[in-house]
Amino acid sequence: MGRSSKDKRDIYYRLAKEEGWRARSAFKLLQLDEEFSLFTGVNRAVDLCAAPGSWSQVLSRKLRGHGEKCEGGEEVKIVAVDLQAMAPLPGVTQIQGDITKVSTAEEIVRHFEGQPADLVVCDGAPDVTGLHDVDEYIQAQLLLAALNITTHVLKPGGTFVAKIFRGKDVTLLYSQLKIFFGGVTCAKPRSSRNSSIEAFVVCQNYHPPEGYVPNMSNPLLDHSYDVDFNQLEGPNRIIVPFLACGDLSAFDSDRTYPLQLDAGKEYQYTPPTQPPISPPYQQACHLRKNNLLSKEDSPSSLGPRQSGDQAQAD
Amino acid sequence: PGEGPVLTVYSLQPVPKACTSVPVLQQHRIHGTRSRVSTTISRPNSSTLQPNSYDLAVFGGKTVRLVRLHLDVSAVKLAHLEISRPPVELQDWILDIRWLREDKQSLLCVAVAHNGALLLDISSGNALAHCSCLEGCLLYSALLVVHKSWADTVLIGGTVFNQLVLWKPGGEASHNRAPVERRLLGHTGVIFSISYLQEKGWLASASDDRSVRVWAIGALGGCGGNCGDLKPTCLRVLFGHQARVFSVCLSPRRVFSAGEDGACLIWDGAGGGTVLRALKGHRAGGIRALAVSPGRDDTGRWVATGGADGGVRLWKVEDDEEEDTVTKTITDLEFSGRGVPKVVCVVEGEAHNTKWSQCRILVCTDQGFVYQYGNGHWELLWRGSPEFQSYCVMETVAVRLKDSISKANLCAVGSLSGVLKVFPISHPQNEIALQSCSGKIHSLIWQQCDQYVYLLASAAEGQVYRWCIDVRFNEMGTVSLRVKCCPAFVLPTCSKRWLTAAVRLPSKSKGALWVCGDRRGSLLLFQEDLDRRGEEEATDCMQANIKGHETDGALQEKEIPEEHKDLTLSPLSCLFGVHGKQGVTSVCEYQGLLYSTGRDGCVRIFRVGEGPLQLEVLRVQRACKGMEWLERSLIESPGDDKKGSTIENKGTEARFVIFGFHASQFVVWDPVKLERLLAVPCGGGHRSWSFWPVHTGVWPGYGALVFIKQGSVLASERPLESTSVSARTWNEGWSLREGIHGRGIGCVCRLGRIWVPNDSTANRAETPGPVRVQIEGQWEIIVTGGEDTSLTVLAVHPNSGSVTVLSIITDHISSVRTVVALTHQDRLKLTSQSQSLSALVISASGRAQLQCYRLQIGWNKRRLAPFCQVVQVAGHRLDEHWERKRNRHKMVKMDPETRYMSMAVVDDNSDAVLVALACSDGAVRLFSVSEVKRQIHLLWETFYHQRCVLSVATCSLKAGKGHRYVLLFSAATDGKIAVWDLTQAASGSSCDAPTPPNPCLSIAAHQSGVNSLAVWPHTQGPLDGGCLVTVSSGGDDGQLMVSTIRVDFLEDRLRTVGVTQDQPQSHLGLHLLSQLSFPSAHAAPVTALKLLRPGLIVTASCDQRVCLWELCSTSINHRGVLCSHVADAAGLAVWEEPVVEDGRTADLGQTLYEYNLYDYYY
Ligand SMILES: C[S@@+](CC[C@H](N)C(=O)[O-])C[C@H]1O[C@@H](n2cnc3c(N)ncnc32)[C@H](O)[C@@H]1O
């Protein structure tokens, strides 16, 4: 398969490259915005699980326009957080860290002390382990960690948008979100594949229950709620409206398109906008490329210590 | 091991097999089990205590459950599992569980995902203590080091942030929060698995960064709750996996690791960190689970691996396998003769079932000398005349002697100038010359047939000379040969015109047939002259009786009898070049079927047609990817094969393995298990090699390879090894449970069932072993298509739950998403108890590929198992189709990466099946599949939807006067359903005018994609000249929609009015009458929807519910739900059982089978 193969199979992958987005996910946020006008009046935003950074790109372009400040003259602030390192973006503050970790959450909160955020977005997803129950669980934990951070930084009336896997316990998550938000919608942008269980919860009008005090050391866990929400029998009870977002005339993410999209324009291959920065498999791939992986029939000569490896006492 | 929620116990002695299994965790998957001895009894005749029952803590998700395993410690081991208590549900995800040692109660230490731990009394379900780490974060893995007390317990967590954190949940922490004691940094990815070896104080971790790290941590836990060294060091970084490492286990001398690449690597833990062995055998998807038994001095260790394919494998590993790397087992036989070895052959000993050490090896050199290797020495056997220098072909054969139990070995050598000599290896001086060939002898082929042995020599100009040789012991105790010359074969004219393979099929009526293969890749059929003159009797041909006392090198010219001189035979049937330009490499025959291999990577299974004598290919079997150079196939022929049983199985395909070269290795590939049975790193394709298979009771594929490499004669087994080939070296593991599909299953289709009467198991009563596998009753036959691009035919025995893989078909090049079957069984009554089943199966996949097969399912009485014969009918690929068109019409090449998403049978008439395909490029395509013509044709395509078409369904309507209408429904990602009138296409009249019709109706049904459709007509419609049709659809939006359409038969009306129509327009009037919807039928996408019977629907969804719905004219009623552990149900096959089985849907008993489809696309 040639390098254009993915361009054929995934129109949004191709469009993202052609339009300069770091990931095809950018279109998901743009299409959600089409439906919900997410960015109206937003100056301060948090992008959780942001790498490689296409949502941050969208935020940066939408909030900052072409200058440092928005129309109202207010300071624009965008904080992006991810486990992975991310190439810098203008006007975006980066934190490299685990959003489920208390210390990372505290660091984010510090950025918004005094002035809460208008919007929190989270596109977090585990690096798929292939075990669906585990993936779904971890994804739910990312969402809850994001919600927990949100309760610390979001202004009342603010919006929270997060990726959600529509799996076995999804109604449990809905029920928790409904506690904090006036309106919860399950939205599926047309750029998200039909075949994927991924969707986005758009949670509007933040108003925590009366007397709720955000607590960092005792984060929200999915277990703190009545298991009754997760009824095994009977049709599901928690009804969250479903909304498909994006124009029907937009490209179809499931369709395979010919490389030549319109007769007038010759197809040209575009390389990816921003390759990942030091992914986990970097060293392994380097070793493989140089035929240095240990094999049955070739004794490897890897020394006991790799540079950069260290162990320390705490 | 657990699979889904089911726990199974296997016993390993004397032979590994499954004992017992129970479902434990309902809708959770099992992630682990931990055992402890609960009771012991004293062994008979011994004072030692032996456990007879174990407590198992089985956990998965947030649930843990106690299961007791009872063992019967008598001669035969019997086990049974007892579940007494309900599962205990915790508030957090469980990562590890350990029994508190020497505890008389039932206390468990539990590590949970939010970096916490608790002490759980499993009998009451109460948490006695709990603690979390001050480092609040999510863990991907955790390990508890537990000794006698909770206070001393140590937890090591693998964080998403690439660190290992060590802390003490039972310490004197304040507010149930404990600090991190040690931190291990170095991994660059998430940590999936942790193992600790107390003896050495080592910790090992496996990571997303594809490495395993071994740390010298020191003593952990125990009295005082040690936290190990203050500054632990990283001893080793082991890079060897090609993908993520999911699991790691330590033993005193070894590190075991397993991962996404499907390999379990055994590392030399103490030494230089090298890979000693790679255990492979799982299908795509990788290894998830790994367990290593504690070592015992005598038996070695067991390694068990559980794959994403659902398979469980077992391997035996010796601790002292220092030399077990594959390279070290290659032995140089240190050829010491004159010249350079050119050709090598293994010669079996004279006795039946010889051992490897009794085999001899023959080598022919560039000097034209033949040397023999035996007992560690080389000796000169035969000295060729000068014409054998620089070029020589050699072939040997073992001939069973007529009136003797022993065998004689003959050797034939041929030269560049056509000189051909044959000599008995025991008496090389008794050589005879068969001189009649003109020009270079390209190849020699021996073929043994009952009493005679044939020699074929392929010489210049496609001439294949043949001799029939009668071999006997003469009075002098030496071997004597009588030779008769047979008419030559002439190969079809082509370049590289010589013979590479031949097999003789004895036939009483037609004269013997020969099936041959040539270097040009053709398969040929020859018939020996019917004129039986001299056919059978070699005695009336020229005498070639050489007596032992005749002089050395006596050369007897054998003249071809005058009347045979110009007599040549041409092929009756020729499949020219079927195996490609690299040629055919072998042909063999077994029970009426022929198996050929070629250097095109294919095995072809074919036969000689029953009508006119010609070759018919039934099926093509590919070896694994990248294995293009196949050398031969070896048929599994069970040793207990009795006469009589062979007749029953005549014409059905046997199990076989494939020999060939894969990159730099000689590989034996099992095409059903999809695994390598043997791999010898010989350096790659060789001109000369010889394989000696172990005969006794071992599945083919174990054996020894001898080959020539750079002038040396090398063997994969030491020739002096007195044992038969050591099973140790080539042991590729036992399969406790067969894997089904490596990755997700994309589609499933039930063919029907076969019945096995009780009496067929009667003769099994004597079979030893306490566990009698139940086999009688019905077997459901199911076809699944997977992301691993294969189609699998399965037999499921619902009574016992056992699943047998009958066949794996590997013609698709991309993920198989949809499969339909046409059987005629279901037209009979459900209760009909047929023992066989025939079905036409059509499958469609990515890369716009269609395949069609005829499957014949039956019961094999000898093996007591169902079998499946696959006949390939036809295949079609859109890109090839467009390529052909382009050449004719100079059209732009179409996008070949179209995926076929769904398929429906439009019509099934005598000469063709019409199928409609939903395509990802936005098209609906109509194909005709002809079994008779073995062809698939694209009839038309329409891009009406302009979006990815996800599903299609059809419906046939009966109108008055015997008229029949056919409707097609297609639905796309925009939530719309289009309805098409395919009556004309179905009637066959418009097949020649391939214009797609316009849709008669378009229905908006869903907000986003329509994943599944089910359609049925109302039987007792109130309408005159029309009827009602219901379309139910399940969408990505979680909605269940039911649309009712009114169909008017305009044509009938027109007819009655007497109007004739000549436009090909629709004669149906369609109107949407009403729509009923259930917006949140599921909390997640509805992935499958099936009609159980009109008005009754089953839906499956990613929310892990399977729901049953009843439709009334005004409402949709939820009638029942099943919670499944399948997180990603993609396909569903439903059928109604005549017996009520399921309590929850009591009035509508049914059995459901669900299969997983994986993958989230982002
Ligand atoms: C689908 S990607 C996000 C793409 C991003 N929205 C964009 O548009 O470029 C998911 C990200 O979640 C991050 N992630 C997963 N687990 C995390 C965690 N515990 N803390 C922070 N980031 C996490 C991954 O590193 C990954 O970059």
Image (cartoon, rainbow, N blue to C red):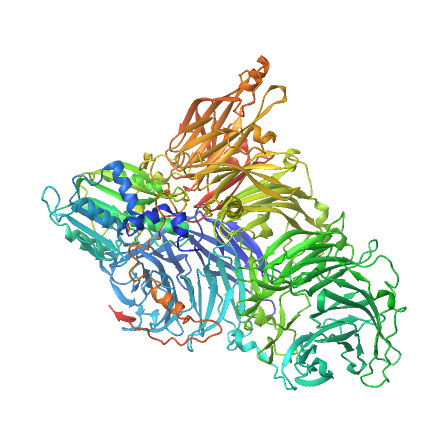
Tell me, yes or no, if residue B91 can be seen here: no
- The answer to whether A193 is drawn above or below residue B213 in the figure is above
Q: Residue at x 56, y 76 (%)?
A: B329
A227 sits to left or right of B79: left
Q: Number of marks in the image?
A: 0
Camera-side residue: B169 or B920?
B920
Q: Residue at x 82, y 63 (%)?
A: B567
B722 sits to left or right of A4: right
Q: Which percent across, then down, holds residue B1062?
A: 56, 22
Q: Which percent across, then down, holds residue B700?
A: 64, 64
Camera-side residue: A72 or B784?
A72
- The answer to whether B65 is drawn above or below residue B205 in the figure is above
Q: Quadrant of residue B782?
A: top right
Q: Residue at x 59, y 21 (%)?
A: B959
- The answer to whether B170 is drawn above or below residue B25 in the figure is below
User: In the current view of this chain or complex, which residue is farthest to the right?
Assistant: B540
Q: Quadrant of residue B431?
A: bottom right
Q: Quadrant of residue A210?
A: top left
Tell me, yes or no, if residue B968 can be seen here: yes
User: In the current view of this chain or complex, which residue is farthest to the top?
Assistant: B1057
Camera-side residue: B1133 or B305?
B1133
B528 sits to left or right of B215: right
